[in-house]
Amino acid sequence: MVKYPSDAHLRAADKFVELFSTDKRVESILLVGSCARGLATKDSCVDITVILDDMGDSLHFETDANDKCLRTPEFRELERTGKFSNLDLNITDGRFKPVKRGWTSGPDNFELEIGNTFVHSHLLYDRRGRFDALRADFLPYYDEKLRRTRYEDVKRYLFNNLEHIPLCAHRGLHFQCLERLRNASREYLQALFISRRIYPIAYDKWIKEQMVEMLGMHRAYSDMVSLFQIGDLESGELEEKAALLRIMAERDLAQ
């Protein structure tokens, strides 16, 4: 449910549509992020996603948008409203594809991009039904063969990170253990959402909302919280946390 935390946020969003809905490069304009979900505060950005038909124009469009917004009173007022309130602009063509990732990079953004564009967003402007046409490729979920492949791949990355933690701990690489645990926990979330054919919001915030309200996993959320209740980084705690996350993954991803 859309809810702007201030009149300045609303005026900035409306002004953006006024400025760019006549731009022939623009197919759709979306409100995304906290404002689109009714959870923003006065310190929140106005998060806007613009769908362009041709990403070859993206750099020029971004430059044009930044220049126009800098000269517009509505956006200057927005910046004065909260500590970090400003326009956060994302540009896409809405044709999302998985990208190659590394063993230590953490989860990719494929499901996040789809979800935040086509599910957790609010449409402000659309040209010729372009938004619905693009969304149809990903809803209710993307291709089943791809989903199964990604599910198995994500679990491989998850368990690879967990297997490295005892090895790193024995070498005294405790901060590397912490990074591996963080990445594994995010991959666990990614796999949970893929397994249930639900698009996530983020892997580093709104965790309680996603696990409890969207997935109905109260116990798993409690376990997730306990993963990061670490008293002594240089003790054997991180190995214990890795063992707990392995139990969580084997329990919740058994399909």
Image (cartoon, rainbow, N blue to C red):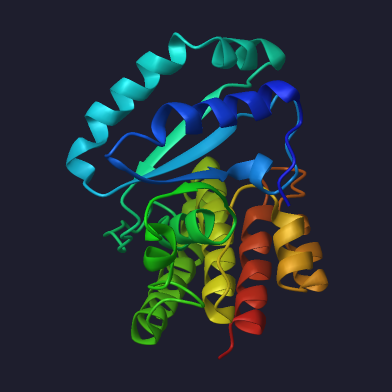
Q: Locate residue 73, reporting x and y percent.
A: 56, 9
Q: Locate residue 103, reporting x and y percent.
A: 34, 59
Residue 253 placement, left or right of 35 = left
Q: Furthest residue to the bottom?
A: 255
Residue 12 placement, left or right of 214 = left
Q: Locate residue 178, reporting x and y percent.
A: 57, 47
Q: Locate residue 10, reporting x and y percent.
A: 67, 29
- Is residue 127 at least partly visible in the picture? yes
Question: Quadrant where the C terminus lies?
Answer: bottom right
Give the quadrant of residue 193: bottom right
Q: Nearer the viewer, residue 87 or 203?
A: 87
Q: Nearer the viewer, residue 236 or 30?
A: 30
- Is residue 236 at least partly visible in the picture? no
Q: Residue at x 59, y 80 (%)?
A: 196
Residue 80 placement, left or right of 231 = left
Q: Residue at x 61, y 14 (%)?
A: 79
Q: Nearer the viewer, residue 254 or 239?
A: 254
Q: Residue at x 65, y 46 (%)?
A: 36
Give the quadrant of residue 110: bottom left
